[in-house]
Amino acid sequence: MVTGSDVVTGDRARAAAASVVDPEIPTLTIDDLGILRDVAVDGDTVRVSITPTYAGCPAMDVIRADLRRALSAAGFQKIEVETVLRPAWTTDWISESGRAKLAASGIAPPGPAQPAGFARGADAARRTGPVQLTLTVRCPRCGSPSTEQVSRFGSTACKSLWRCRACQEPFDHVKPL
């Protein structure tokens, strides 16, 4: 039977976990980013499930430690943090609030991870020739769609470096995954 205090405890645990910021993009919380999958309270144990943005994400150790610290500060002593790899994280999990925060901090948010008509698996294997996907990235500073990719690699592995042709400013773009 779930009591009112159980709900309050679960809400408090969720709020504490959701407040943890991403160490690579500190304007976003792990909840904004969509890597916080679940927070459950079972007796005196809090179980948190997170999914990395990609399998080799170097920020995961810091995120685990920050989760333990935030939950401990909220009064929880027994904390388990589980990494869940399936389904794999996608940029589609970034919240609308997270996308707005990215743009406000000068980072272009990603478009859809799978553009309309994009084939995977057997459908993709049947294609002949290269698949050309056109990516339009708007400048987060002036809003211009006249941008160009400077490098596939930005300040972190999950971002690429772009430049706006209109305002000439460089900016990061979160790669759609």
Image (spheres, rainbow, N blue to C red):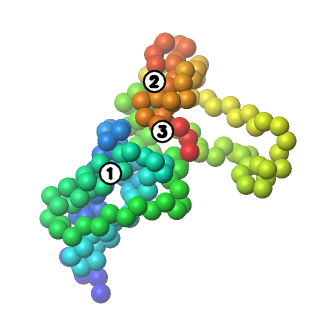
Number of other residues with Cα within 10 Å of mark 3, as a class: few under 14, some 14 to 19, many 20 or more: some
Query: In this view of the protein, which residue sits in the foreground, 144 or 19?
Result: 19
Query: In this view of the protein, which residue sits in the foreground, 122 or 102?
Result: 122
**Gap in Å between the C-alphas at discs 2 and 3?**
13 Å
According to the image, label 1 marks what residue? 61
Residue 152 x, y percent position in the rendering = 55, 29
Circle 2 or circle 3, nearest the eye:
3
Residue 66 x, y percent position in the rendering = 25, 52
Q: Which mark is residue 49?
A: none
According to the image, label 3 marks what residue? 158
Quarter residue 112 falls in: top right
- What amino acid is labelled 3 in the image? Cys
User: SS at mark 2?
Assistant: strand
- What amino acid is labelled 2 in the image? Phe
According to the image, label 2 marks what residue? 171
Residue 113 x, y percent position in the rendering = 59, 45
